[in-house]
Amino acid sequence: MYLVKSPLLLKWYYPSLVWNKSRSDKVIYLTFDDGPIPDVTDFVLKTLKSFQAKATFFCIGDNITKYPEIFERVIGDGHRIGNHTYNHLKGWKTTDELYLRNFSKCQELTATNLFRPPYGRIKKSQIKEIRKYYPNMKIIMWDVLSGDFDINLAPHKCFKNVIKHTVNGSVIVFHDSLKAFDRLEYALPRTLQYFHERGYTFETL
């Protein structure tokens, strides 16, 4: 069970987190979680380049270690990097000490001021710990979840999720992962085309 549009209650409960950007400009913020990995991240980079679009990649530290050349390609193409923990930890089921240690291990590789908690699940105590040691860290959530990770979701439904709920300043979540690829491969180029035709630009966070 997941909600495509982030509910106002969550935004109220976590007011210090970033859920969306300014609603006044026709700008969309595409984000990609869980990479970098061969083939899928390569596809994303190629597709973004074809639309001259920029995006933000929330990378798993373990994947950076395994595929450093793909990680460098993301940076070389002018995209932003975010921390997504080293081992994709679920904050609600992880002690604060372990969570911070895993976050810091990824931070050594990413050297970023952007963090997205895997699954969007993080305790307030973990937010406090991260900000104690990294006071400039921005914790990025989203307001549109494509659902590309859902193997039961038809690719065209994934695309519909995005275009139905995206507005000015939306932060959209896709995944550059093998699990998501069937839906990502269909939805990403169509999303870019749809909003490009309507005068939107795609920028980094």
Image (spheres, rainbow, N blue to C red):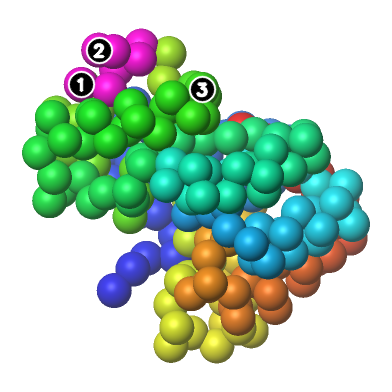
Contact between labelled residues 1 and 2, with CB atoms less than 8 Å apart = yes
Q: What residue is pinned by disc 3?
A: 111
Q: Residue type at mark 3?
A: Ala
What quarter of the picture does the N terminus occupy? bottom left
SS for callout 2:
helix
SS for callout 3:
loop
Residue name at image x 45 percent, y 83 percent: 151
Contact between labelled residues 2 and 3, with CB atoms less than 8 Å apart = no
**Numbered range of the magenta stretch:** 129-135
SS for callout 1:
helix
Q: What residue is pinned by disc 1?
A: 129
Q: What residue is pinned by disc 2?
A: 132
Mark found first going from the N terminus, 1 or 3: 3
> How crowded is the residue under tag 2: few (<14 C-alpha within 10 Å), some, or many (20+)?
few
Residue 62 x/y as whole percent: 42, 47
Q: Is residue 139 visible?
A: no
